[in-house]
Amino acid sequence: MNSETGTETCADRVERFGYLARRLVRPLHRSLLNRRRLTLGSAAAAAAAISLPTLAEARNPFEFPTPVTPVAHDTLYVHDLFLAVMAVVFGIGMCVLLYSVIQHRKSRGYSPAAFSGPKTLGQWMVVVVPVLALAFIDYVVMGIPSYYAVVAMANTREDAALVVKATASQWKWRYEYPDQEIAFTSSLSTPRAQIESGSPTDPHYLYEVDNPLVLPAGKKVRILLVSLDVIHSWWVPAFGVKQDAVPGFLRETWVKIEKPGIYRGQCGELCGTGHAFMPIVVVAKAEPAFERWVAQTQNGEKAVALAEEQPLSRNDLLARGKTAYETNCAPCHQITGLGLPGAIPPLAAGQAFTATPELTDKLAQLGTYRDGKIVLVPVDRQLGIVLHGISGTPMPAFGLQLGDADIAAIVTYVRNSFGNHTGDVVQPAAVKSARVQAN
């Protein structure tokens, strides 16, 4: 109840209705379920996991991945319950159909009925009983567990031991642990050469990342989801969770992983040309091991912050920039820097580029496009583009995703590759200064 207005909130109504449901209808269904309160995320989402049998161990090639969360366990249970009910209904209906066709065939002297609706008590029973039976199945056998599933799925805050924010962008995930002050970007680590060759050699081809998400086993984790560009979806089949990340909205879900291990998934929403290169890897650790990881990561981030304040040599910047470019930029601009005709501009100065007037006008306003060709802008302006992106285009704001050293290395690499020979060397201090000026 809102203390100021005295009005009942949505949460109050859900809680009140949940109380009535527990008092009135749950005892009826307990004999059918005899299980703990359902906590499934989405039966449809878990059913789609059949298409990814390699992401988690399954009981057989046609089964679900082995569930490792309460959500996944109950999703599988509800799936099996629904399947059994549908099989029984189908069997009964098919038996009645076959009996009617065989028993009342013309060769036995039966003539078509002349009535157009039920008239006798028996005819009414044939109509009413199936309708009531199906209503009972729909609203009780299936409806009650579905209701509790939705309520439990929305209960992301109760008993949550950890909060993780996952920010999606084309085509990577950024994970933040607000209470632990840890943040890092998780990107595909399959070598581009292996992808371009079409000859995968890694058993986890396209399902491997440079920085996996690390979570404690046995603890409820609340996951907040946001997107910086288009709709993405955080999907790990073994967890039974598939939640969309929508630009402008804060979505959330939760997991409670039963045992330590490595669990793999991917973006489950078509999000552009690099959709296939947006994997998710979750490493679940026992609580002591997770605490050690937190301490090590915090110390490591401090060391990285100190290291990024030091100047880097040109060779170090070029080597680091090549790696960072292939991970973050190549999915759009391509490994060759030639971009995509009509959509993604090339990175080489003087390269011809034709696109929609809206895109070329934006590029011209930034000074990167003139007379149908790409123009290499000054370092400070290029840093601004990389840090803040270009609104209305696929170019994201890497300032929210990468550190100063990586951005400096990328800009240095681009200005000395793909036919560009400026000789410019951009240090992390310049990126830090550009961030300060922007704020």
Image (tube, helix red, strand yellow):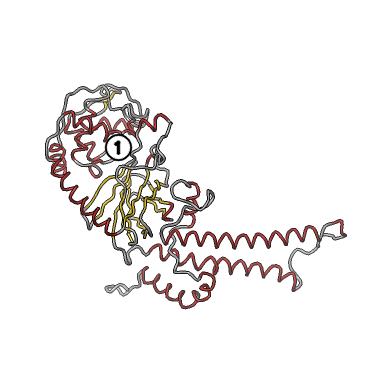
Which residue is most to the bottom?
Answer: 23
Q: Within 10 Å of the Cα at label 1, are there few (<14), some (14-19), or many (20+) other Cα atoms?
A: some
For residue 434, side relative to residue 255 (left or right): left
Which x, y percent locates residue 214?
30, 52
Which one is in front, 202 or 347? 202
Q: Is residue 248 above or below residue 137?
A: above
Can I make out residue 249 in this image? no
Q: Residue at x 20, y 54 (%)?
A: 295
Which one is in front, 423 or 271? 423
Can I make out residue 49 in this image? yes
Which corner quadrant holds the C terminus?
Answer: top left
Q: Residue at x 41, y 57 (%)?
A: 68
Residue underneath mark 1: 328
Which corner quadrant of the image does residue 307 belong to?
top left
Which x, y percent locates residue 180?
22, 56
Which x, y percent locates residue 227?
33, 48
Element on which disc 1 rests: helix
Q: Residue at x 17, y 24 (%)?
A: 423
The amino acid marked with disc number 1 is Asn
